[in-house]
Amino acid sequence: MPVVSVTRLRIRSLRFKPEFTLRTPQTIRQMRRAGGFLGGSRLPDRRLTFWTAIVWRDQADMRRYVSGGAHL
């Protein structure tokens, strides 16, 4: 059964934004290559806050992605 993961990340300070900007494309590439990835969306919000909604084939695929690579 598909699993939807919704996350919210707020960058606490502008000093962390360059690292976030650098790592985001790496994380997106890892996600798209991950087994079980069905689709997703990244949504910017106010005050350096970002939301993601990602659909996985099952919970095991989602856990494999979360526990390794650029996401870790």
Image (spheres, rainbow, N blue to C red):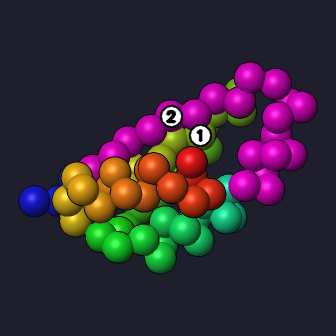
Q: Is residue 60 visible?
A: yes
Most distant residue in the bottom direction: 33
Q: Which residue is mark 2?
A: 8
Q: Quadrant of residue 55?
A: bottom left
The amino acid pointed to by label 1 is Phe
Task: Give coordinates of residue 71: x percent, y percent.
Answer: 57, 52
* Residues drawn in magenta: 4-23
Residue 28, relative to residue 66: is it above or below? below
**Where is residue 25 shown, x and y percent of the image?**
68, 64
Determine whether label 1 and label 2 are within 8 Å by CB: yes
- Frontmost residue, 12 versus 30: 30
Query: Is residue 45 shown in magenta?
Result: no
Look at the image and tell me in which quarter the N terminus lies: bottom left
Q: Which residue is mark 1?
A: 50
Assign a secondary structure to mark 2. Answer: strand
- Residue 36 circle label: none
On the image, the x and y values in percent for residue 48 come to 71, 33
Above or below 57: residue 8: above
Q: Looking at the rendering, which quadrant does residue 58 occupy?
A: bottom left
Residue drawn at x 82%, y 35% as measured from the top left: 16
The reply to whether residue 46 is visible in this rendering is no
Residue at the (89%, 31%) spot, across then down: 15
Q: How many C-alpha atoms fall within 10 Å of the one at disc 2: few (<14), some, or many (≥20)? A: some
Tell me what residue is drawn at x 44 percent, y 50 percent.
Answer: 66
Label 2 sits on what residue type?
Answer: Arg
Q: Secondary structure at mark 1?
A: strand
Sequence order check, earlier mark of 1 and 2 = 2
Left-right relation of 69 to 1: right
Residue 62, how many percent across, how many down?
33, 55
